[in-house]
């Protein structure tokens, strides 16, 4: 190997050394901070990324000069120092420099067993991790001088060279091995999966060994200062006691508690001064490094050595609590606390979760359609789910795909799994609105709704009534009951969200179709309802029957009589929604789906409908078949219903205005926002808006109340986006429904695309599933065109998106940059959207995202 020259090979870690995390790695920089804080850190030398890169390329540093820093008899450890600790790195190697001379010295100072143990462990580690020899050959449980001699002989036989006695040679080989391990294909792929860039560098840290052996109190351990699950203050960790007078391998009684504990001895009892020094070190790190740290330490004859300090591992809940506590203690600012919590991580706090640490018996995998976890009995129909709920038995609803008639079963189930569908399928959208865990597009299943069985890829057959657990966060179905963790919406959560709201500069509303969803939206501090899908209000038994009578009516008068029966039901729905939102805006989308969705599709449902309508079964069957469309999502739905069957929209408008008058008598004034769906042409808007205004005038004449309302358009078709300028002339707002707009732009069915989308993404056809992540190039261009043309025609035009993309941080960033007024997402994604919007606003102010990485004097 060629010697490295003409550049700074290594840097002794001193308070004034020139070092940075992006040149020497996070561990090296943290150790410098600890040195600056006057903590008892053993002498340390850092090798920067450049040096390690040259070592991997075949050059060698001057290890003799490096070891000279540590004195005449060096004994050191070598640890990785990547820029981000999450990227990992090769394992540490201890006791480099251990040779016959060092062994003899330690026998005099620490005793035979301690010296033998250290030497034998180093030979084994060097043989396996550096020389890459078979680990089984060196698996000798005996600790003795004879075992050391055998290991040296085995090494020479296997490596065909004597075990190196020169510490400089040992160190050079260790550095080379670790440098090349970082450049291996598997290591590179692993760290890239954790977010590391392609050219991420590795530094190495060489540190004087603090042995943790001695006649006085000696050992090693780690200490943390917060509960890793809740984030509450708590000293915990481990301390492994060592003694030169016993076998150097630890016995069970050598593991001590940290704090005094009635269950056994503790570090606080046997080394009170060192314990106090450690707790003081933790407090100093928290104050000066502005982070909750985990301290790795050794004691040698009662003397403390701090080997390292890293950010303490923690759950999302603990991370949020710790950030809020640091802000309240004025260690960091409230803005920094907001930036330290990733928006998407909040999903773990808003729902019950399957315990990540528990064992899992996975029986199926699919797309994680809605986060959370739930346990229940398998059911295969909405009716069975309702029966199970009536009996007080939690259930998981399994369907090939869900349809509107499954709504009642979905409302009472604890979770939903479908064989088909994607992120914006019916099941996923409804589940997110209800806050239920959902897995869609589950693969490898054999579902028989007739036999009520579910066959799995590994040959198991589950039957209705079997107990399962659904993990909507990971997209897994588990056999049996799994341990759960409850949601964590505590004071810290609400404090952080309050700070986020102070920072963000784009509105966040919720999509809510029921009173329960509206109440959830208010609980999560939504600024209104951006999408209320009125069709979801008709799926209970009574309303469904009236709806079918209306659909089957031959004459306008018969249709109107059915609608008159629906009117008070719909009015009461809106009264509840307006009261729940307490004067906040409510955007109500008029009836959208094709009418055939309200008609039965099986023989039993057709017979029930025939009995209700007092018609022959053959007549009901014929008329249902006649109403069936070849492509119903592009057929008679949305505004087309309002134009061809105006009675439906007239009834809904009257219900809205009568509810507005009723609520306005005792509450803040309500200004409803009425949204027309699936618009393609200006004339559609003119016709429907004229009728809405006529209904409003009639209600004002009847009640004497003065109504204030807004009429707008849901932009779901490419043509509506392209003609937004002329449509805006008759609209107070444009709300882009990105679910249908994505379908129509791509010519894809969101319910069927999951069958091939994985292949399309892996082959690079699409960078991501466009139903999961907003396509900013194609669909995004339509949004920008529509927004620009709409605002040019009407500068005061309100702009928003209300598709499922609205809860995704990247889509929020797009809308914020485009000047949209708000986003509207499912209620349980409102906190995520609020926090993501705050991150975007704070990033625009160029605040430091990670203050722990800044230089602390």
Image: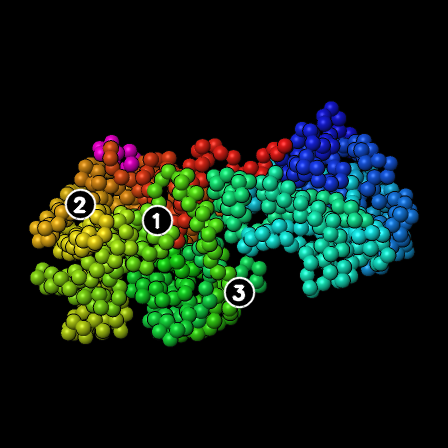
Q: Give how far apart the Cα atoms at labels 3 and 1 are.
A: 31 Å
> Mark 1 to mark 2: distance in Å?
22 Å
Q: Residue at x 47, y 42 (%)?
A: 338
The residue to which callout 2 is attached is: 708
Horizontal placement of 803 versus 262: left or right?
left
Q: Looking at the rendering, in which quadrant would you find the C terminus?
A: top right
Crowdedness near tag 2: few (<14), some (14–19) or many (≥20) residues, C-alpha within 10 Å? few
With respect to residue 623, does 777 lie above or below?
Answer: above
Residue 794: image quadrant is top left
- Along the polypeptide, which appears first: circle 1 or circle 2? 1
Report helix, strand or loop for mark 3.
Answer: loop
Marker disc for residue 483: 3
- According to the picture, the residue beneath numbered tag 1 turns out to be 526
**Circle 1 crowding by C-alpha within 10 Å: few under 14, some 14–19, many from 20:** many
* Left or right: 1 in relation to 416: right
Q: Residue at x 21, y 60 (%)?
A: 572
Mark sitting earlier along the chain (3/1):
3
Q: Secondary structure at mark 2?
A: loop
Which contiguous range is marked in magenta?
785-794
Number of the front mark, 3 or 1: 1
- x, y (%) of residue 17? 69, 29
Q: CA distance from mark 3 to mark 2?
A: 52 Å
Instruction: Give the residue at x 53% y 65%.
Output: 483
Are discs 3 and 1 less than 8 Å apart at CB?
A: no
Quadrant into which the N terminus falls: top right
* Residue found at the very far top of the displayed protein: 6
- Please state which of residues 774 and 837 is positioned toward the viewer in this rendering: 837
Is there any visible trace of residue 603 in the rendered image?
yes
Circle 3 residues within 10 Å: few <14, some 14–19, many ≥20: some
How far across and down, in percent of the image, does residue 360 sit?
55, 63
307, above or below 454, in the image: above
**Dividing the picture into quarters, in which one does residue 795 lie?**
top left
């Amino acid at each position: 190997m060629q010697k490295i020259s003409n550049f700074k090979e290594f840097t002794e870690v001193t308070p004034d050394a020139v070092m940075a995390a992006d040149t020497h790695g996070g561990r090296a920089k943290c150790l410098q901070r600890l040195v600056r804080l006057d903590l008892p850190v053993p002498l340390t030398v850092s090798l920067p990324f450049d040096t390690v890169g040259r070592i991997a390329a075949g050059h060698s540093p001057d290890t003799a000069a490096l070891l000279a820093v540590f004195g005449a008899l060096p004994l050191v450890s070598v640890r990785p120092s990547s820029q981000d600790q999450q990227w990992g790195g090769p394992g540490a190697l201890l006791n480099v420099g251990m040779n016959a001379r060092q062994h003899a010295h330690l026998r005099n100072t620490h005793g035979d067993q301690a010296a033998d143990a250290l030497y034998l462990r180093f030979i084994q580690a060097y043989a396996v991790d550096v020389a890459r020899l078979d680990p089984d050959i060196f698996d000798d449980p005996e600790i003795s001088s004879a075992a050391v001699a055998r290991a040296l002989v085995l090494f020479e036989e296997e490596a065909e060279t004597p075990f190196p006695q020169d510490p400089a040679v040992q160190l050079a080989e260790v550095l080379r091995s670790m440098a090349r391990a970082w450049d291996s294909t598997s290591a590179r792929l692993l760290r890239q999966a954790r977010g590391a860039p392609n050219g991420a560098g590795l530094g190495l840290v060489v540190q004087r060994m603090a042995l943790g052996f001695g006649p006085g109190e000696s050992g090693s351990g780690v200490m943390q200062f917060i509960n890793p699950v809740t984030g509450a203050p708590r000293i915990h960790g481990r301390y492994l006691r060592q003694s030169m007078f016993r076998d150097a391998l630890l016995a069970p009684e050598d593991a001590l508690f940290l704090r005094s504990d009635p269950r056994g001895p503790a570090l606080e009892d046997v080394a009170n001064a060192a314990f106090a020094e450690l707790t003081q070190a933790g407090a100093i790190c928290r104050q000066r490094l502005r982070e909750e740290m985990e301290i790795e330490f050794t004691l040698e004859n009662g003397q403390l050595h701090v080997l390292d300090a890293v950010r303490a591992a923690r759950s999302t809940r603990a991370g949020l609590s710790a950030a809020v506590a640091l802000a309240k203690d004025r260690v960091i600012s409230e803005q920094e606390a907001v930036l330290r919590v990733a928006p998407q991580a909040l999903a773990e706090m808003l729902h019950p979760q399957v315990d990540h640490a528990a064992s899992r018996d996975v029986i199926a995998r699919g797309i994680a359609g809605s986060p959370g976890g739930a346990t229940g009995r398998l059911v295969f129909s909405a009716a069975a789910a309702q029966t199970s709920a009536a009996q007080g038995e939690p259930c998981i609803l399994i369907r090939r795909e869900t349809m509107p008639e499954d709504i009642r079963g979905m409302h009472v189930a604890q979770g939903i799994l479908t064989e088909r569908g994607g992120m914006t399928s019916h099941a996923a959208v409804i589940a997110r609105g209800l806050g239920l865990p959902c897995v869609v597009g589950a693969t490898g299943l054999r579902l028989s709704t007739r036999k009520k069985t579910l066959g799995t890829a590994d040959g198991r057959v589950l039957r209705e009534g079997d107990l399962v657990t659904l993990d909507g966060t990971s997209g897994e179905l588990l056999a049996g009951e799994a341990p759960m963790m409850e949601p964590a919406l505590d004071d810290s959560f609400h404090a952080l969200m309050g700070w986020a709201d102070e920072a963000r500069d784009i509105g966040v509303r919720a999509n809510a179709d029921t009173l329960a969803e509206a109440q959830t939206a208010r609980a999560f501090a939504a600024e209104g309802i951006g999408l209320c899908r009125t069709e979801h209000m008709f799926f209970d038994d009574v309303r469904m029957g009236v709806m079918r009578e209306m659909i089957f009516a031959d004459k306008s008068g018969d249709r109107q009589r059915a609608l008159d029966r629906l009117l008070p039901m719909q009015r009461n729905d809106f009264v509840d929604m307006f009261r729940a939102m307490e004067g906040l805006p409510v955007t109500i989308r008029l009836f959208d789906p094709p009418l055939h969705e309200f008609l039965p599709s099986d023989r039993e449902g057709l017979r029930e409908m025939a009995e209700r309508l007092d018609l022959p079964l053959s007549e009901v069957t014929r008329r249902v078949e006649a109403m069936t469309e070849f492509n119903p999502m592009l057929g008679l739905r949305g505004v087309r219903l309002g134009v061809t069957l105006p009675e439906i929209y007239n009834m809904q408008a009257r219900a809205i205005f009568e509810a507005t008058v009723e609520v306005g008598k005792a509450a803040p004034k309500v200004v409803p926002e009425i949204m027309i769906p699936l618009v393609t042409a200006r004339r559609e808007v003119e016709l429907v808006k004229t009728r809405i205004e006529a209904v409003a005038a009639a209600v004002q004449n009847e009640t004497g109340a003065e109504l204030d309302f807004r009429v707008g358009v849901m932009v779901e078709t490419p043509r509506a986006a392209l003609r937004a300028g002329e449509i805006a002339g008759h609209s107070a707002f444009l709300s882009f429904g990105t679910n249908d707009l994505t379908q129509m732009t791509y010519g894809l069915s969101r319910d069927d695309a999951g069958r091939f989308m994985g292949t399309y993404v892996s082959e690079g056809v699409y960078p991501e599933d466009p139903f999961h992540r907003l396509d900013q190039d194609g669909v995004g261009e339509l949004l920008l065109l529509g927004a620009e043309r709409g605002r040019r025609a009407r500068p005061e035009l309100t702009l928003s998106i209300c598709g499922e993309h609205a809860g995704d941080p990247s889509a929020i960033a797009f809308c914020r940059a485009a000047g949209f007024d708000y986003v509207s997402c499912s209620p349980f994604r409102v906190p995520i959207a609020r926090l993501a919007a705050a991150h975007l606003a704070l990033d625009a102010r160029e605040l430091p995202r990670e203050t722990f990485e800044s230089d602390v004097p």
